[in-house]
Amino acid sequence: MSMTVAIIISAIIAFGVTAALGFIIIPWLRRLKFGQTILEIGPSWHKSKQGTPNMGGLMFIIGIIAAFIISACSFVSVGGELETEYSAIMTGRENVLVTASLIFALGCAVVGFTDDFIKIKLKRNEGLTAKQKTLGQLLMSFGYVLTLWLSHNTVWYFPFLGTLNFEKNVFMSALFWIFSIFIVYGCMNSVNLTDGIDGLCSSVTAVSAFTFTAIAVFQKFAGLGILSGALLGGMLGFLCWNRNPAKTFMGDTGSLFLGGLVAALGFCIKCPFLLLPIGIVYVCETMSDIIQIGYFKLTHGKRVFKMAPIHHHFEMCGWKENKICVVFSIVNAVGCAIAFALIYFGSSVQ
């Protein structure tokens, strides 16, 4: 089986399982009364979404895991294309990297599930306190970075410049830990912020997943390709239920899973700084929130945006949710194209 076929199979399985689970999980969430509570601070027109089943992220989490396991095992059992060291999926440091990424994403989902459960079943609208949520995310981030360190996945690639091994000395090691935890924690929360309107986080993440898949094919990294393909299929399958008007929301269960997985995929391509263009929409969402809060405090009540994160600003400007999803996905696609060009042309001059 070729790597490309394995990736396609992974995407198809993830799409099929995720989409099919909507017929089971959404009614189940309704019976359990796991409905979304719309906060007063949100746009007033979102009140109509009150009670929409939350925690629908369980659908694509199951779909992605199933697709990855089935496709990876099939790829190995029938004989994959072991063209380079990157193609090894069941052995070596690359396998640790991919497996750890999926486990880390599941750990993030546990933090999100706890937050959702407290909001919905215990009727505490804010869920986990800020300190509790931050602690959970930092613990997961630390565990993932520790795995990278112990497996010696500490070499980062910089397009046009070459590679950098952070295990050279104590100073470089310290930089690795600081940068890695910052990137993982920041990406996790950025993706979480993007999940604010129907289909936005799903569509933007689908674009990012396609890019990771393309990079995996270029690098001949089968494990990364199969996992990225599963993510792409899972997002498209979830969009069947999450596009406007949404039949379910992914909740923090889903958005923190995605945040963790996207961050981890940045480390899988050995160039986590490329998460900036690959997730340019995530970055804009976070920066708009930071700018809004900072400016509000400095000016004692004035605002830069009508509402933050920035997707709410465009809502307040009269944009429909579907238009925001399309435009934001196109913007993210431009960032992704830049990232792929850096990988493609940057490696060719080495």
Image (tube, rainbow, N blue to C red):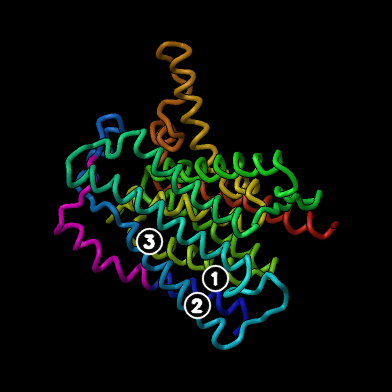
Q: Which residue is mark 3?
A: 238
Q: Secondary structure at mark 3?
A: helix
What's under tag 2, amino acid-wise? Ser
45 is within the stretch colored magenta:
no
Q: Position of residue 296 (x, y in %)?
A: 44, 17
Check disc 3: other Cα within 10 Å, few if <14, some if 14-19, many if 20+.
Answer: many
Check disc 1: other Cα within 10 Å, few if <14, some if 14-19, many if 20+.
Answer: many
Let me know if residue 327 appears in the view.
no
Q: Position of residue 199 (x, y in %)?
A: 39, 52
Q: Position of residue 120 (x, y in %)?
A: 20, 45
Query: Is the magenta region chiefly helix, strand or loop?
Result: helix
Q: Secondary structure at mark 1?
A: helix
Q: Are discs 1 and 2 less than 8 Å apart at CB? A: yes
Q: Is residue 26 left or right of residue 202?
A: left
Q: Which residue is mark 1?
A: 226
Bounds of the magenta span? 17-37
Mark 1–mark 2 distance (CA, rounded to whole Å) = 7 Å
What's under tag 1, amino acid-wise? Ile
Q: Which of the marked residues, 2 or 3, is nearer the chain's N terminus?
A: 2
Q: Is residue 83 left or right of residue 15?
A: right
